[in-house]
Amino acid sequence: MVGLVPRLLLVVLLASSVGCTAWGKSKPKGKPADGCCLNNPQVTSFQTVINTSASPSTDEPERFEVIRSQDRLDIVWPELFAPNTPPSFTPPIDFDSEMVIVYSMGTQPSGCYSAEIEAVHAQGEALLVEVIEKEPAPSCVCTFSLVKPFHVIRLDGRKGPASLCVRRTQLQC
């Protein structure tokens, strides 16, 4: 046990010096370099289309998708809200110059869960999408209804791959 503390401290110091968001409770997806880091990434601006929760009818998995056509958005948009009726419009996106990124946590057990795309980093045509998932602390009083938190953003179009890095935090009530 005595040797564990210095090793743990070394791991913490190394992880914090690297500057990655992928550490601790993170779960990297895709194959970004160094876990969830790109080499010399640039922050890319984006605009939120919608950040909300829907009531799922089934146990839905996590979803991460890059949408590069209106036809695909017309399919995905109602799926995000299902079984509820989506807003009467599909957001108009100029897919000649823009693209859409969708992140959904999948089905969660209470209304205290949320998901937010915090940042998008670019390196050439490749993107790294950083998401924060919030879950309730044990002291939170939450609604006991199933929810599907999701965030949809629009940004300048790129042809390269997108990778996902999710960080989990606790909501303090």
Image: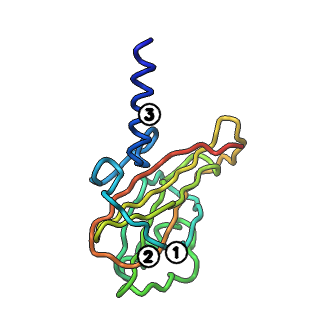
Residue 83 shown left or right of residue 38 in the figure: right
Query: Which of pointers 2 and 1 lies earlier in the amino acid sequence?
Result: 1
**Numbered disc 3: secondary structure:** helix
Q: Nearer the viewer, mark 3 or mark 2?
A: 3
On screen, residue 95 versus residue 134, left or right, reads left
Q: Residues within 10 Å of mark 1 (few under 14, many from 20)?
A: few
Q: Which mark is residue 155?
A: 2
Q: Cβ–Cβ below 8 Å for labels 2 and 1? A: yes
Tell me what residue is drawn at x 50 percent, y 81 percent: 90
Residue 136 is at least partly visible in this image: yes
Place of residue 53 in the rendered image (x, y in percent of width and height, measured from the top left): 59, 61
Is 48 or 2 nearer to us in this picture? 2
> Label 2 is placed on what type of residue?
Leu
Q: Which quadrant of the structure image shows residue 89?
A: bottom right
Q: Quadrant of the C terminus?
A: top right
Q: Please give the name of the residue rendered at 44% of the width and 76% of the height, measured from the top-left corner.
A: 155
Q: Which residue is mark 3?
A: 12
Residue 1 can be seen, yes or no: no
Find the distance from the CA under tag 2 to the CA under tag 1.
Answer: 6 Å
**Residue at left offset 51%, top offset 60%:** 118
The tag on residue 47 is 1
Horizontal and vertical percent position of residue 31:
27, 53
Residue 129 x, y percent position in the rendering: 41, 61
